[in-house]
Amino acid sequence: MGRRKKPKVYPNVQFTGIADKGRAVGRDEEGRVIFADGAVPGDVADVLVKHAQPLGNPSLTLAVRETLERGLADGAILSGMATGLPPSVEDLEMAKRAAG
């Protein structure tokens, strides 16, 4: 029995087309080709980051601003700390203020 490989995180993947079996195809910041289910051309996504741990103390305000301004996103989705949990009211209010 072999070891399970740790999933890799690919930030800022820009999807530009559709590949075999309807999977989206794009490239990450380093030019690697990434295939993903559930994305469409024009999407920009961080792939496999749900269980990633950021270094340092991340700022929700900064993350929302960076997503909208530098990432050129049309919106930001805020989720809770675990699957199925909603975000706190305080985090929603902070994200709304950061979004302007």
Image (cartoon, rainbow, N blue to C red):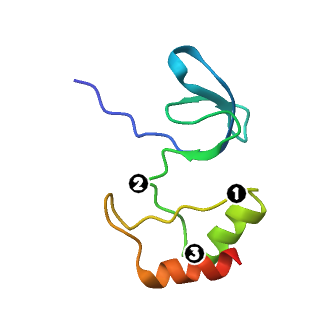
Answer above or below: position of 77 versus 42.
below
Which is more toward the observer, 54 or 93?
93
* CA neighbours of label 2 inside 10 A, class few (<14), some (14 to 19), many (20+): few
Q: Position of residue 93 (x, y in %)?
A: 54, 83
Residues at marks 3 and 1 touching, judged by CB atoms closer than 8 Å: no
Quarter of the C terminus within the rendering: bottom right
Going 32% across and 33% down the picture, which residue do you hit?
4
Going 72% across and 42% down the picture, which residue do you hit?
29
- Direction from residue 2 to residue 26 in the image, left or right: right
Q: Position of residue 49 (x, y in %)?
A: 49, 51
Query: Extreme top residue here?
Result: 20
* CA neighbours of label 1 inside 10 A, class few (<14), some (14 to 19), many (20+): few
- Direction from residue 24 to residue 7 in the image, left or right: left
Identify the residue position indicated by label 3 in the image: 60
Quarter of the N terminus within the rendering: top left
Give the foreground label among 2 and 1. 1
Q: Position of residue 82 (x, y in %)?
A: 33, 62
The quadrant where residue 19 appears: top right
- Mark 1 secondary-structure assignment: loop
- Mark 3 secondary-structure assignment: helix
Going 39% across and 67% down the picture, which residue do you hit?
80
Give the foreground label among 3 and 1. 1
The amino acid type of the residue labelled 2 equals His
Identify the residue position indicated by label 2 in the image: 51
